[in-house]
Image (cartoon, rainbow, N blue to C red):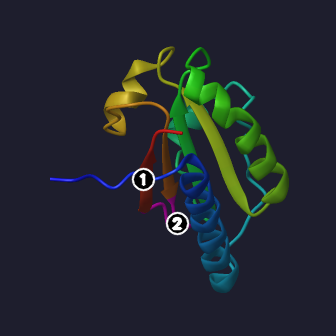
Amino acid sequence: MKLKKTSVRSNITGFFVLLAVAGAIFHQFGQGGSATASSSDVVSRAQIQELPVKGIVTMLDLGASSCIPCKMMAPILKALEKEYEGKAAIVFIDVWKDPDQAKKYGIRAIPTQIFFDAGGKEAYRHTGF
């Protein structure tokens, strides 16, 4: 069985396309709010309990601040936060500091990005950088 290789560039492109589609869906249905969480912010236990953010598209990045691929994702997440401020919640959870979240979301490898629609239903999941 031959496996098809994909480049990092195509994976990143797919990631941005998916986020753009999620943003378009969000915009089309007009549900919104100003709740955003920063990947650089420490996410409190109370905030974790409220994930995904209701009424807004949410991208949850589960990784670790000491993980090399996770560190590579950090500037991408920062750019997404700026571009989608007020339109989508971009949240980072360090699963090495909070391993219960890895179990809760069924994480097998980090980083893993989970996209939720405005209703809180998982729409897509991507594993790796």
Residue 53, visible in the rendered structure: no
**Chain-order first, disc 2 or disc 1:** 2
| Mark 2 residue type | Asp
Is 103 left, or right, of 87 in this rendering?
A: left
Is 26 left, or right, of 60 in this rendering?
A: right
Q: Position of residue 129 (x, y in %)?
A: 54, 39
| Mark 1 residue type | Arg
Instruction: Look at 50% across and 67% down and name the residue there.
Output: 119
Q: Position of residue 11 (x, y in %)?
A: 54, 53
Q: Which mark is residue 125?
A: 1
Residue 119, visible in the rendered structure: yes
Q: Main secondary structure of the magenta part?
A: loop
Taking the magenta stretch, the answer to whether it contains residue 117 is yes
Instruction: Look at 47% across and 23% down and name the residue there.
Output: 95
Instruction: Look at 51% across and 34% down and name the residue there.
Output: 62
Instruction: Look at 85% across and 51% down and name the residue there.
Output: 82
Q: Which mark is residue 66?
A: none
Within 10 Å of disc 2 (Cα), the crowding (few <14, some 14-19, many 20+) is many
Q: Position of residue 47 (x, y in %)?
A: 60, 36
Taking the magenta stretch, the answer to whether it contains residue 36 is no
Q: State which region is magenta.
A: 116-121
Q: Secondary structure at mark 2?
A: loop
Give whichever of 126, 30 is nearer the camera.
126
Q: Which residue is mark 2?
A: 117
Give whichever of 72, 40 is nearer the camera.
72
Quarter-of-image position of residue 121: bottom left
Q: Position of residue 118 (x, y in %)?
A: 56, 67
Instruction: State the residue lying farthest toward the bottom.
Output: 28
Quarter-of-image position of residue 61: top right
Q: CA distance from mark 2 to mark 1?
A: 12 Å
